[in-house]
């Protein structure tokens, strides 16, 4: 009993020390600049997706070449995200945060005035470098600013931002691109950035462990290995499907280089006295399991965000604005889940809430797995709402559980590493699902085409009916050709539809499979939470 009392007193002393640097500022005031910065950064991950065809036309490049506009941003931000701990020691966390906002804002201006693919790719790299540190620092500041018993509410708000921003990104990007110009999807960051910079300078203050330190040195080899790993990995994931994966020699070489650099990077970080990233944090079981669950959720989130607009535009004939609007119920579901979590987190075990969220994601995935080409808008809206509800309800509790056993001085490093791995998970998920749709569509095409022959009475009946319809406008031989072409086109659409259906069902299965991991989170996390509260 005496040992338990001593531990409780030590926890209280730590909390008092942590509170002393805030000087009585409201945690909500401290969170304002971080919420704006996080929203701005995450929004730009998806806001340009629907504008790529317009950019490709402006720069006179192919659609495949225009994807470098997305890839360059993801690679650059991925390199910066895990280095936030080192940069915070070198410059001070507040200074690094403000510098990141300024670089992001300036790079957004360069993106908006770009007149060539080379220029916008350079600007997007700069934008990624500037914005890469904003999300993990925002997460760390919000976790530190609130007492432990109020963290569920803080994480509900943060989770809503992280989940909602990429969902509304395509809608915002589509509306601005169609009604104004794609340049303005970047220019809108400038007023938001200016506002964020000034309130950050006014409100933020570094705790003692996040202030500028003397004698900080860079882990040069570690940084170089990190850059090689992330750059080669992103190129492999982004271009692998188009290049037929490992049947392509250059993809194979890049994949080997990526794996070798990752293994070398991990060994170097474990042996280095002053590593770029502190990997010892994975000794914490809650953090490790929570990070794995978040990686899978991110893969499902970004993967489904990538393929659903494709389905609506390719097969249902939606334009950029309509496909973006169709994603709004997902955002509404995420907002609803955030409010539910803030209300229920103190009454229900967070692991149970996360499991319920994963069940809802699985149900939504299987709901999309029964689509057809005759559906109404409501058949997209309801599963999307359930998807958003499940994603936020799963993501927010697991973020809170994964860091609840960590000390405040570990938050910056933990948030940086966690967000890096979530980005990688999202990239892997998007790449895998794109390949799945391509391969499964070919598989279903092979299965269906064998029914298009003269001995199939159903096929011949429909072919004859279509030929008769076309003969009203053209010669019989041309009408027969048009009927055959039309039937083949319908078969191709059905094969592609089944490719999307298989992908959505795989997402549903994946959500159900990781549910047991949630309950491996130690119960000690909850006990510590009660002690600190």
Image: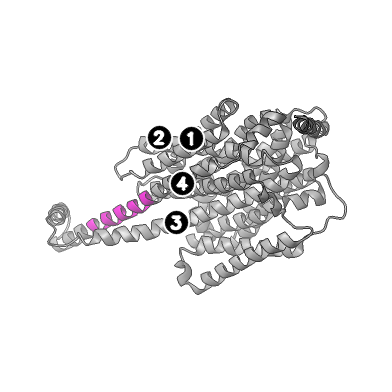
Q: Which sits earlier in the primary sequence, circle 2 or circle 3?
A: 2
Q: What x and y, as percent, mark residue 499?
A: 36, 54
Q: Is residue 309 left or right of residue 372?
A: right
Which mark is in front, 2 or 4?
4
Q: Which mark is residue 513?
A: 4
Residue at which label 1 appears: 356
Tell me the crowding category of disc 1: few under 14, some 14 to 19, or many 20 or more residues within 10 angstroms, Cα based: some
Q: CA distance from mark 2 to mark 4?
A: 23 Å
> Relative to 5, is 521 above or below?
below
Q: Is residue 218 left or right of residue 340?
A: right
Q: Is residue 169 visible?
A: no
Q: What x and y, as percent, mark residue 270?
A: 71, 59
Residue at figure coordinates x 78%, y 45% from the top left = 93
**Residue 405 counted in the magenta span:** no
Give the secondary structure at mark 4.
Answer: helix
CB-based contact (under 8 Å), mark 3 and mark 4: no
Q: CA distance from mark 2 to mark 3?
A: 24 Å
Q: Residue furthest front?
A: 1
| Total tally of numbered discs in the picture | 4
Q: Quadrant of residue 208?
A: top right
Q: Which mark is residue 434?
A: 3
Residue at which label 2 appears: 382
Q: CA distance from mark 3 to mark 4?
A: 21 Å
């Amino acid at each position: 009993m005496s040992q338990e009392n001593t531990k409780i007193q030590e926890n209280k002393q730590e909390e008092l020390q942590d509170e002393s640097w805030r000087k009585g500022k409201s945690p909500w005031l401290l969170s304002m600049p971080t919420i704006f910065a996080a929203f701005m950064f995450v929004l730009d991950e998806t806001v340009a997706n629907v504008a790529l065809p317009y950019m490709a036309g402006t720069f006179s490049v192919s659609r495949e070449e225009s994807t470098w506009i997305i890839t360059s941003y993801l690679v650059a931000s991925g390199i910066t995200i895990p280095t936030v701990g080192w940069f915070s020691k070198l410059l001070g966390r507040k200074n690094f945060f403000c510098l990141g906002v300024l670089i992001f804002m300036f790079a957004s201006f360069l993106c908006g005035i770009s007149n060539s693919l080379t220029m916008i790719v350079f600007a997007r790299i700069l934008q990624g470098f500037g914005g890469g540190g904003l999300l993990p620092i925002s997460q760390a500041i919000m976790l530190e600013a609130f007492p432990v018993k109020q963290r569920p509410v803080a994480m509900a708000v943060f989770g809503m931002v992280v989940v909602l921003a990429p969902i509304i990104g395509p809608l915002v990007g589509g509306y601005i691109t169609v009604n104004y110009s794609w340049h303005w999807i970047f220019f809108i960051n400038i007023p938001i950035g200016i506002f964020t910079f000034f309130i950050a300078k006014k409100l933020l203050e570094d705790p003692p462990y996040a202030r500028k330190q003397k004698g900080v040195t860079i882990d040069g080899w570690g940084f170089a290995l990190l850059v090689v790993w992330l750059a080669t990995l992103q190129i492999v994931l982004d271009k692998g499907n188009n290049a037929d994966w490992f049947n392509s020699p250059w993809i194979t070489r890049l994949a080997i280089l990526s794996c070798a650099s990752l293994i070398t990077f991990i060994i170097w970080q474990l042996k280095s006295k002053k590593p770029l990233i502190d990997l010892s944090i994975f000794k914490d079981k809650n953090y490790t399991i929570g990070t794995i669950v978040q990686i899978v959720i991110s893969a499902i989130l970004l993967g489904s965000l990538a393929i659903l607009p494709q389905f609506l535009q390719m097969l249902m004939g939606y334009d950029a604005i309509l496909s973006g609007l169709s994603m709004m119920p997902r955002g509404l579901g995420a907002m609803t889940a955030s409010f539910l979590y803030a209300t229920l987190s103190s009454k229900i075990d967070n692991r149970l809430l996360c499991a319920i969220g994963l069940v809802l994601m699985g149900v939504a995935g299987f709901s999309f797995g029964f689509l057809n080409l005759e559906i109404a808008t409501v058949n997209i809206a309801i599963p999307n709402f359930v998807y958003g509800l499940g994603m936020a309800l799963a993501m927010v509790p697991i973020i809170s559980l994964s860091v609840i056993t960590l000390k405040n001085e570990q938050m910056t490093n933990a948030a940086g590493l966690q967000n890096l791995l979530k980005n990688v998970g999202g990239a892997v998920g998007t790449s895998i699902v794109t390949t799945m749709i391509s391969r499964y569509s070919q598989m279903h095409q092979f299965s269906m085409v064998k029914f298009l022959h003269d001995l199939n009475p159903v096929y011949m009946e429909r072919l004859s009916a279509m030929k008769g319809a076309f003969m009203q406008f053209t010669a019989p031989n041309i009408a027969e050709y048009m009927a055959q072409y039309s039937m083949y086109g319908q078969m191709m659409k059905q094969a592609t539809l089944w490719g999307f259906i298989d992908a959505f069902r795989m997402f549903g299965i994946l959500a159900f499979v990781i549910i047991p991991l949630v309950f491996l989170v130690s119960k000690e996390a909850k006990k510590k939470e009660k002690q600190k509260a």
